[in-house]
Amino acid sequence: MMPFFSTHATTPSLPRELRSLRSWFILPLSVRGVPGWAARRALRVCGPVTMPSETLWEIAKAEVEKRGSNGNEGDGVESGEKSVFFIGSKNGGKTTIILRCLDRDEPAKPTLALEYTYGRRAKGHNTPKDIAHFWELGGGTSLLDLISIPITSDTLRTFSIVLVLDLSKPNDLWPTMENLLQATRSHVDKVIMKLGRTNSKSASEMRQKIWSNMQKEHPDRELIDPFPVPLVIIGSKYDIFQDFDSEKRKVICKTLRFVAHYYGASLMFTSKSEALLLKIRGVINQLAFGVDKSRSICVDQNKPLFITAGMDSLCQIGPPPVPDNDIGKFHAHTPMELWKKVYEQLFPPKSMRTLKDARDPARDPQYAESDVDEMRVQKDQELEQYKRNASKSWKQIDLDF
């Protein structure tokens, strides 16, 4: 029979059987609120023969605090929880990318409004798993109001944006990109401003952090305006895009390179190719779990672009693809406005009604639910009847003045 052992014992000498605690004593996953790995580490710290003046739980608590402080030191890797927000073109492949990153072998379904999932990853043996929160905004640009839900002062410090653009629909590309980035940036700026009122130090650190991808000696440092949170721009459906006319591909590639560089973002193209999806997965894992960042680069317009933040330059991108004597005709006030007008000259956007996807998603056949739809019709009829009755009752009131 195994002898009794108390974790609070202070007797200096122990029986032979207890001199090596690790040989038989395994703590449960969590005891009195202390993680199992911390308690087990504390046992190893205690030593096999003599017990320290501190209790086991005090040592375990100190170990937890030590690991927490070490994780926040300047090792370039943050631990804990991170959030990645996918926005972009409707039916652009956002869900497919998320499922691939999470190793989920299931068919992608249309995203309704705002959807959430999560992933976990262990950094080593007996260490807590990091958690990544994945948010996805459906409907293209039709549900911009929902952007404010996942972006809060609590999540912003470890928040990233992934903008997925459908390369097969170049006429929708600029309006989709512009509307989503403007709405997202506006809300992020509001959150940072609100945070600054209560925690000015954190707000200041966030504003400085956005320059981390741009080297101090980079020639374009004074010419760009980095996005307030890490941003990755993904051009999807490259398999269709690669069959476009070479001049169209040149305009799209140069335009996206300028936008990504101006916002301090990474840019990459992908398709159903396993090799390209693995590259995208590596980039998303860096955002979600802080793994090592890839420094590879491909700027050849005849190949899928892959440019990490801070690796491009205005000199390499070159001017907008129009004759020099025509640039003055665009009457642009900023470089971004000039690139927009040049792009839309070749790819004019569709009507605003089409871009906003104004159709009521509640009446979209792909989301049909017979029981819900029947009840909705009934309630709509009741509402109309109520309005008619209310209108009649007001007309029958005899107002006395």
Image: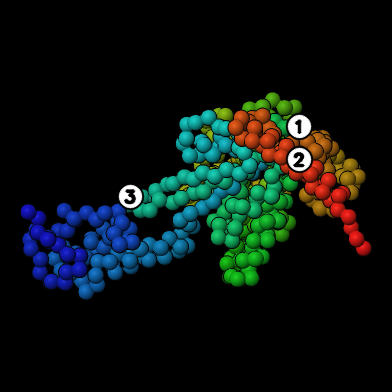
Q: Amino acid at mark 2?
A: Gln
Q: In the current view of this chain or complex, which residue is farthest to the right? A: 401
Query: Which one is closest to the eye, mark 3 or mark 1?
Result: 3
- Secondary structure under the numbered disc 2 in the rendered image: helix
Query: Measuring 21% from the left and 74% from the top, which residue is drawn there?
Result: 53
Q: Nearer the viewer, residue 203 or 376?
A: 376
- Secondary structure under the numbered disc 1 in the rendered image: helix
Q: Is residue 113 left or right of residue 337?
A: left
**Does the rendering let one see residue 349?**
no
Marker disc for residue 125: 3
Query: Which one is closest to the eye, mark 1 or mark 2?
Result: 2
The percent coordinates of residue 189 (x first, y second) are 68, 60
Give the quadrant of residue 11.
bottom left
Rounded to the nearest angstrom, the CA distance separating label 3 from label 2 is 65 Å
The percent coordinates of residue 241 (x first, y second) are 68, 29
Q: Mark 2 highlights which residue?
A: 385
Query: Measuring 50% from the left and 39% from the top, which residue is drawn there?
Result: 101
Crowding around mark 3 (Cα neighbors within 10 Å: few <14, some 14 to 19, many 20+) is few
The mark nearer the N terminus, 3 or 2, is 3
Query: Which one is closest to the eye, mark 3 or mark 2?
Result: 2
Q: Mark 1 highlights which residue?
A: 248
Rounded to the nearest angstrom, the CA distance separating label 1 from label 2 is 55 Å
The mark nearer the N terminus, 3 or 1, is 3
Q: In the current view of this chain or complex, which residue is farthest to the bottom? A: 53
Crowding around mark 2 (Cα neighbors within 10 Å: few <14, some 14 to 19, many 20+) is few
Q: Is residue 56 left or right of residue 63?
A: left
Crowding around mark 1 (Cα neighbors within 10 Å: few <14, some 14 to 19, many 20+) is some
Query: Measuring 74% from the left and 46% from the top, which residue is drawn there?
Result: 179
Q: Which colouring convention does the figure follow?
A: rainbow
The mark nearer the N terminus, 1 or 2, is 1
Q: Amino acid at mark 1?
A: Lys
